[in-house]
Amino acid sequence: MAQLALILRPHLAQGIVVEGLTNIAELFPSPVHVDPRNVATFLDVHDTDDRQVLMRDVYERVAARLEAL
């Protein structure tokens, strides 16, 4: 997680980097939003409980990486 922040921080002055990070943040605003669901679908997780855990995990990972910036 820290490595990604170290790589991206020097580039945060570039508009395209900020735009990309903003787009990612907009795609993962909550664990039940469409993109965490898309990850669960892509990984072919059908069990309701497993799917909910995966969606929460995906959301939290993305949020933590964005917050580290």
Image (cartoon, rainbow, N blue to C red):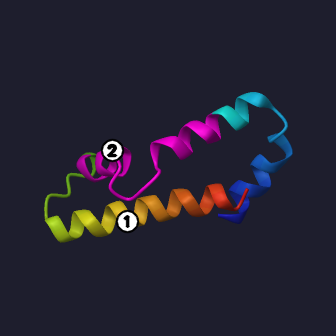
Whether the magenta-drawn stretch holds residue 28 is answered as yes
The secondary structure that dominates the magenta segment is: helix
Could you tell me which quadrant the C terminus lies in? bottom right
Whether the magenta-drawn stretch holds residue 5 is answered as no
Classify residue 23 by image quadrant.
top right
Residue 15 is left or right of residue 46, and the answer is right
Would you call the spot at circle 2 few (<14 residues within 10 Å), some (14-19), or many (20 or more)? some
Q: Residue at image x 62%, y 59%?
A: 65
Question: Residue tagged by mark 1?
Answer: 56
Q: Residue at image x 42%, y 56%?
A: 30
Question: Residue tagged by mark 2?
Answer: 34
Mark 2 lies on a secondary structure that is: helix
- The relative height of residue 52 versus residue 20 in the rendered view (above or below) is below
What is the tally of numbered marks visible in this picture?
2
Would you call the spot at circle 1 few (<14 residues within 10 Å), some (14-19), or many (20 or more)? some
The magenta segment is: 20-41
Outermost residue toward the top? Answer: 16
Depth check: give the residue in front, 33 or 40.
33
Mark 1 and mark 2: span between their CA atoms? 12 Å
Residue 12 x, y percent position in the rendering: 80, 42
Residue kind at label 2, given as amino acid type:
Val
Classify residue 5 by image quadrant.
bottom right
Residue 6, disc: none
Q: Residue at image x 20%, y 52%?
A: 44
Mark 1 lies on a secondary structure that is: helix
Residue 24 x, y percent position in the rendering: 54, 42
Residue 37 is left or right of residue 46, and the answer is right
